[in-house]
Amino acid sequence: MLAGCKTSPVSETEYNDPRYTGPGQGRAFGSDGLILFGGRSKTPSEEGGSGLGVNAYLWRAALDTLSFMPLASADPFGGVIITDWYQPPSAPGERFKATAYILGRQLRADAVRIAVFRQVQEGGQWVDAPVSAVTTSDIENKVLARARELRTQATGS
């Protein structure tokens, strides 16, 4: 016997309560709702060029810059690009992996971070090796330069 269940009528009062339906309630996806294919109230330059969660120019530039490495994962809403290990033909005993973080919606130098990982082969095993800070900085600068180039092409100036 189910003694804990009671048979009370189903009521919709909680759905009609003005506390839950009043104008003070915001929208989950902002004033424009969830925009997939245009129709937004902001211009592309205000939004960084697209409906992505990060700056579209930085996102595209990071993909372009890291395109020589195999892509493992890309999250345009979180702004993370992860590559798989890449072994340059000129250096068969070492391999590289990179992770790009797009940190904002504006085209700024502090809105992109690149982490580069390097391994060398020793005795048949891959061993972590240090990466020069210059390497990381150079890749970040290439991403920024490419993003500026993409913005210039898009705006025509």
Image (tube, rainbow, N blue to C red):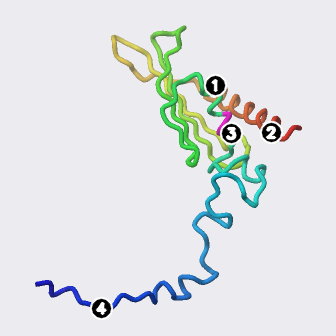
Q: Which residues are magenta?
A: 57-61
The residue mark sitting in front, 1 or 4, is: 4
Query: Circle 2 is placed at which residue position?
Result: 154
Residue 39 point in image, percent of width and height: 72, 57
Considering only order in the chain, which callout, 4 or 2, is on the residue closer to the N terminus? 4
Q: Give the residue type that dot 3 points to.
A: Leu
Query: Circle 4 is placed at which residue position?
Result: 8
Structural distance between the alpha carbons of marks 2 and 1: 30 Å
Horizontal side of 134 relative to 1 (left or right) equals right
Mark 2: secondary structure: helix
Considering only order in the chain, which callout, 3 or 2, is on the residue closer to the N terminus? 3
Sort mark 1 into few (<14), some (14-19) or many (20+) by Cα contacts within 10 Å. Answer: few
Query: Circle 1 is placed at which residue position?
Result: 134
Sort mark 4 into few (<14), some (14-19) or many (20+) by Cα contacts within 10 Å. Answer: few
Q: Give the residue type that dot 2 points to.
A: Ala
**Residue contact between numbered discs 4 and 3, judged by CB atoms under 8 Å:** no
* Residue at image location 57% in from the left, 66% down from the top: 28
The residue mark sitting in front, 2 or 1, is: 2
Considering only order in the chain, which callout, 1 or 2, is on the residue closer to the N terminus? 1
Considering only order in the chain, which callout, 4 or 1, is on the residue closer to the N terminus? 4
Figure quadrant of the C terminus: top right
Sort mark 2 into few (<14), some (14-19) or many (20+) by Cα contacts within 10 Å. Answer: few
The residue mark sitting in front, 4 or 3, is: 4
Mark 3: secondary structure: helix
Residue 110, relative to residue 131: is it above or below? below
Q: Give the residue type that dot 4 points to.
A: Ser
Query: Circle 3 is placed at which residue position?
Result: 58
* Residue at image location 34% in from the left, 16% down from the top: 125
* Residue at image location 60% in from the left, 84% down from the top: 22
Horizontal side of 1 relative to 96 (left or right) equals left
